[in-house]
Image (spheres, helix red, strand yellow):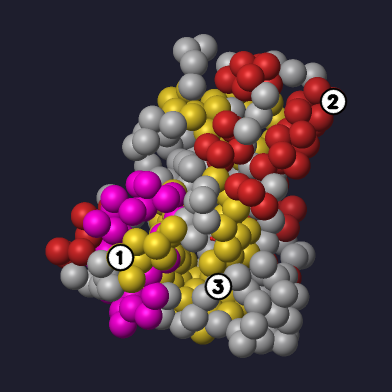
Amino acid sequence: MKVIPLTGTIGAEIVGARVTDPDDFQQIFDAFAAHSVVVIRDQQCTPGDHLAFARRFGQINVNRFFKPVVGYPEIATVLKEKDQTEAVGEGWHTDHSYDEVPAMGSILRALEVPPFGGDTLFVSMAAAYEALSPSMRKFVDGLSAVHSSRHVFGSSIRDSEAATSGRLGNANAATQDATHPVVITHPISGRRGLYVNPVFTTHIQGLNPDESLAILAMIYEHCKQPEFQCRIRWSAGDITIWDNRATWHKAINDYHGFRRLMHRVTIEGVPLGAAVAA
Ligand code: SIN
């Protein structure tokens, strides 16, 4: 098995591994821990194989809002039909940050991809944190932020294309609010990283609303720098695993007129610890 870094910052491609081979798992896990995002190409894999692979990382964390795959309630469908315009996940985010114990990672399997476009971008939140000035790091280290599912999956999105097409549902279950440190110590690497995101974070605690908006806007612009990113170009059969505590991701919506179908499994995490004691 070979692990080939995609950039100097984040992401790797694993060559010569099979997700169905238990003997390959430890090396896949080590690459995931080291690079935060790993893509394994051309896997002959069933939904059952996808789940079995995910269970090697931990318990499955079932998404409440994405349409499940028929017969596999633990697998979320990530779909854009050729006549649809909105892509699920097209805003920068990390999965399930609205939960008290947010998901550790997600495993996305490509079933049908457009002839061009539909890539997924990732950001290293540790690299973004480390590139802040020492004074700004000191300021954000002690902060906490509130994350919510309400404004993203609740009844306010009932008229959106994703909701009316049935890709997102269960709006009544969008009741999660969670407070997390703005800077976490990563549970696996021990590295500090930013843990706020433009989709689910509502505000920073203890700042007035204008201050919170301004600080979050500054952090978000900072994190979007290409130097902190890698980009996965998909083919059908590819599987990408990412660490939700170490990354943001964004589905690029640039393939109108074509269908893109992915299956996603999300894995349970642990409570997040702050970079500094409160
Ligand atoms: C997601 O946000 O989990 C989906 C990412 C993608 O479709 O590329």
- Identify residue for label 2: 210
Question: Tag 1's secondary structure?
Answer: strand
Q: At which x and y percent is residue 5?
A: 44, 58
The quarter of the picture where residue 159 lies is: bottom right
Q: Is the residue marked by circle 3 packed among few (<14), some (14-19), or many (20+) residues within 10 Å?
A: some
Number of the front mark, 1 or 3: 1
Can you tell which mark lies on residue 141?
none
Residue carrying label 3: 233
Q: CA distance from mark 1 to mark 3?
A: 19 Å
Residue segment shown in magenta: 27-55
Contact, mark 1 vs mark 3 (Cβ under 8 Å): no
Ligand 1, image quadrant it occupies: bottom right
Asked which secondary structure carries label 3, the reply is loop
* Quadrant, the N terminus: bottom left
Quarter-of-image position of residue 139: top right
Residue 2's tag is: 1
Q: Looking at the image, is 119 positioned above or below residue 129? A: below
Left or right of 31 in this view: 6: right
